[in-house]
Amino acid sequence: MAPRAAPYIGRLRRLIGSWVPAALIVLVLLGLWEGYVRLWAVPKWLLPAPSVIAMTLVVSRKLLLDHTLVTFVEVVVGFGLSLLCGVLLACGIAASRTLERALYPFVIASQMVPIIAIAPLLLIWVGYGLTPKVIVVALTAFFPIVVNMVDGLQSVDPDVVNLLRTMGASRWQIFVKVQVPTSLPFLFSGLRVAMAVSVIGAIIGEWMGSSQGLGYLMIRSKPQFLTERVFAAIVVLSVMGVALFVLVGVIEQLAIPWRHNAPRQRSL
Amino acid sequence: MSQYPRTRMMLWSMFVLMLVVSGRHGAYAQNTTLKLALDWYPNANHLGLFMAQEKGYFRQENLDVMLYTPVDPSTVLQTVGSGTDDFGISYQPDVLLARAQGVPVVSVAALVPHPLNSVIALQSSGIVRPRDLVGKKVGYPAIPTNEPLLGTMLKTDGARGLQDVELVNVGFDLVPALISRRVDAIVGAYWTHESILLENQGYPVHIMRVEEWGVPDYYELVLVTNASTIKSKPEVITRFLRAVRRGYEDAAQDPQAGVDILLKGTKAEVDEKIERPGAQLLAPLWKTDKTPFGMQDTARWESFTQWLQANGLLASHVRAGDAFTNRFHGGN
């Protein structure tokens, strides 16, 4: 066992090494924040101290958990939808020049549409349930997926493709055996960006109209001057966002292990 | 001209003297600059302020007042509480909720002395009283105080309460939600604004006023300032409120002249077809025969505070008497 465990210990050490500076910075910032609030006696409705926010996290854990689950479902479903649409669209764009010319401008234009302006209309069109939030999430998340996946599919080595062609491979075989594996690292880069913006998309969707979720909890807490609860919701949201981001990284390692055998520094 | 050198000399010296005097005047009677955060885009509720501005009532009190709409009007009490804004327009329930969390804001005048908030349904829905809402969807802008308003109205009309309806947060798009039939009624809408907007769009409405269905009468809009401003600059507040009072007295007399000023000052932001009828509805509320405009009633503050506390929305330690003062109206 020992010789096989060695590389894992090395990796663990690297992982700790990469986390310690970030943790230190967070601790120092929190300390400064706490000190500032206490020293200048800043009222908690204006800026709550980290300790007060931590207390709120504990006291309101049930409330926060309930709303987190709602937002979590919105993010995951919306992300799934954008993954499905994004990959299909990317394959279409990479497969056909005509489709690329026809679709790509619209894909780009879709990112110029201010979601904030569209979201209230979405609510009127499709109602106030899960659907409008999922649509907002999917709209914000599918763009990085499409762009990265298209780049990946188009970045295959033409020599490899020519070789396979001379050996009689079909277009489908080239697609499955060369293009898809080549595009996977690109796809996962896109997915990590998409995951980060998905969380923001869900909150925007909830702000426009909802009866539950972390975004709803924030807009409910603000008029009650419960600033510490707004911050607590932000903390939970950040933790959820980071966890999902890491999850995408883990899935990436499982899906394309060859990428991580290459010597390369990664932050997460 | 040269045959009158003395006259010329005198004229010049008078001119120079005038410059000096006006310069001294500027140096000594420096105008006080005040920032007032509005609760929403300029509308008929603000007529008195815009009239005081346009007619120079603020200037006559040596005040330069800047009226502006914050990017997010729900932060008015925070910016006033922290001293970023000198004055702000807010709502009686919100002032009490803010005080419960320690935000040092105090209401110094009532601008709209009765609730404007109401439940509005389309006439075509057949909903004419709160009881008719049982089993229906009601849209609201996720403002916590709207919930007990509707709850009290339902109970007063013989229903069990909020559990009888489905409340839907529709953000601030109350009117589209109602027109598109996503909801059967809306709460949090003004009977001086949304109702007019709906009728203008060709949808006759039925209005249920909150104070007619068991909710204690309260002040929809109040003028708030910081507790420390009251201590440090009482004389500025007195001057400011004197000008505001004159503005609203004018608005009560001639609301349409006020709308003219509003339209001139704000242009595209204001919908004339809503503000003209709105101002006509508001003017009677501004007419105060016995008490000076802006004066607040202790009993009304207390009964509304108790109602909020009975509905579990307000901490019991909040005292109504601390949340407002009449001392700038020549009162106690």
Image: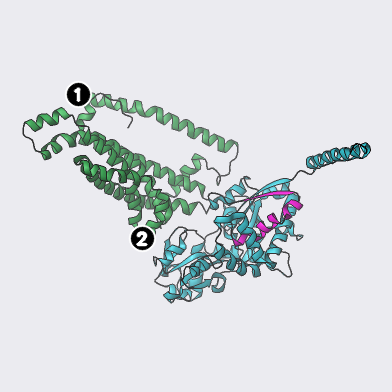
Q: Which residue is mark 1?
A: A2
One can see residue B56 in this view: yes
Q: Which mark is residue A125?
A: 2
- Of residue A236 and residue B257, the one placed in the foreground of this image is B257
Secondary structure at numbered mark 2: helix
Q: Residue B268 location in percent, x, y?
A: 55, 56
Q: Position of residue A37 (x, y in %)?
A: 56, 38
Q: Is B170 situated above or below A30?
A: below
Residue B238 or residue A218, whichever sits in front: B238
Is B302 in the magenta?
A: no
Three-letter amino acid code at disc 2?
A: Trp
Label of residue A252 in the image:
none
Which chain identifier belongs to the cyan chain?
B
- Badge 1 marks a residue whose secondary structure is helix
B44 in magenta? yes
Instruction: Give the quarter of the figure containing the N terminus of chain B.
Output: top right
The answer to which quarter of the image holds residue B125 is: bottom left
The residue range painted magenta reads B43-67
Say which of B64 and B186 sits in front: B64
Q: In screen coordinates, is B129 left or right of B254?
A: left
Residue drawn where x is 40% and y is 41% of the image: A238
Q: Chain of mark 1?
A: A
Q: Is residue A193 left or right of residue A221?
A: left
